[in-house]
Amino acid sequence: MADQPKLDPRVKLTVSVKERFMFRDIFPPKGNLLEMKIIRAIEKKIDFSVEELKEIGYANVIDDDGNPTNRVTWDVNKEKPLSIELSGIEIDLLKQVVTKLSDKGEIEREWLDLAIKIDEAKKGE
């Protein structure tokens, strides 16, 4: 009997609006072609629609001079968590990213919950 092909184990994560923004902070700015393709696939899963941004009252924070900053705001009372399904290769890459950040001592306090969520994610559940 021939071996059955192994299915790619999936991981389900539920992420908040803040965590969806934080994903972009933890992704490496560059990498090999495969890594960048995987990151792009994850970004598509966590991306916001225009309708969702309107629903949560997303806005850029303006400084005292009326200039936009790099910070954003939204109504946390209107946000809905997003449940995403990640392939085995996607969760493996995220775990590698978290491990590399941890090994370098670069996990920021505000990323901690997301880093733990990724680190503890189990395949096939």
Image: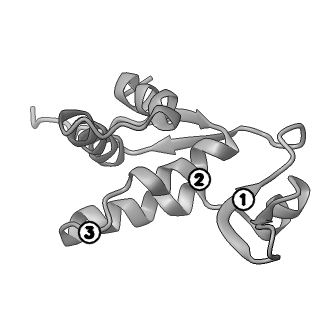
Q: Mark 1 points at which residue?
A: 72
Q: Mark 3 points at which residue?
A: 30
Q: Which amino acid does label 3 sit on?
A: Lys
> Mark 2–mark 1 contact, CB under 8 Å?
yes
Q: Which amino acid does label 2 sit on?
A: Phe
Is 6 positioned to the left or the right of 70 in the image?
A: left
Which of the two marks, 3 or 1, is nearer to us in this view? 1
Q: Is mark 1 on a helix, strand or loop?
A: strand
Q: How crowded is mark 3: few (under 14 residues within 10 Å), some or many (20 or more)?
A: few
Q: Is mark 2 on a helix, strand or loop?
A: helix
State how the image is colored. Answer: one colour
Question: What whole-number distance in Å separates the C-alpha atoms at marks 2 and 1?
Answer: 10 Å
In the rendered image, the vertical position of residue 48 relative to residue 75, given as above or below: below
Q: Mark 2 points at which residue?
A: 21
Question: If you read the primary sequence from the N terminus, does the residue marked by circle 3 or circle 1 appear first?
Answer: 3
Q: Residue 3 at x, y = what percent? A: 12, 35
**Residue at the image position 10 percent from the left and 37 percent from the top:** 2
